[in-house]
Image: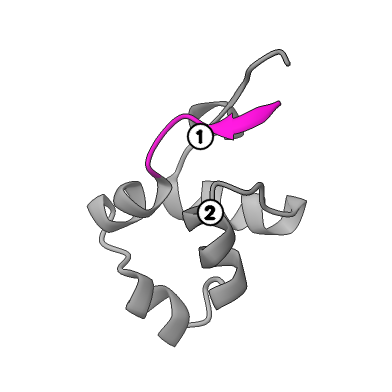
Amino acid sequence: MLKYKIDVIQALKDKGYSTYYIRKNKLMTEPQLQQIRDNKLLSHDALNKLCSLLECQPGDILEYIPD
């Protein structure tokens, strides 16, 4: 099972991206932000955008935990 190993919303805020700013500038959609809040995985494109915003690799955000 994949899960987030960081608080993604807080990491975005630390980089200067409030959820209001993200929505206003259409960097991510509200459903994508809600998926992050609900600890649900994003689509490939949304994960790509998230890594771009945070300037990191997917492994910095996600971890695999065996079932």
Inter-mark Cα distance, 2 to 1:
15 Å
For the N terminus, the quadrant is top right
For residue 40, above or below residue 26? above
Picture coordinates of residue 23, whole percent (x, y): 46, 80
* Circle 1: residue type: Ile
Left-right relation of 21 to 56 = left
Picture coordinates of residue 21, whole percent (x, y): 35, 78
Q: Secondary structure at mark 1?
A: helix
Q: Is residue 4 magenta?
A: yes
Q: Secondary structure at mark 2?
A: loop
For residue 62, above or below residue 18? above
For the C terminus, the quadrant is top right
2 or 1: mark nearer the eye: 2
Number of other residues with Cα within 10 Å of mark 2, as a class: few under 14, some 14 to 19, many 20 or more: few
Residue that appears at 66% across and 47% down: 41
Question: Could one spot residue 49 in this view of the protein?
Answer: yes
Q: Which residue is the site of mark 2? A: 38
Picture coordinates of residue 35, whole percent (x, y): 59, 59
Q: What residue span does the magenta drawing correspond to?
A: 1-7
Q: Which residue is the site of mark 1? A: 61
Residue most toward the bottom? 24
Of residues 35 and 46, the one drawn nearer to the viewer in this rendering: 35
Number of other residues with Cα within 10 Å of mark 1, as a class: few under 14, some 14 to 19, many 20 or more: some
Residue most toward the top? 66
* Circle 2: residue type: Asp
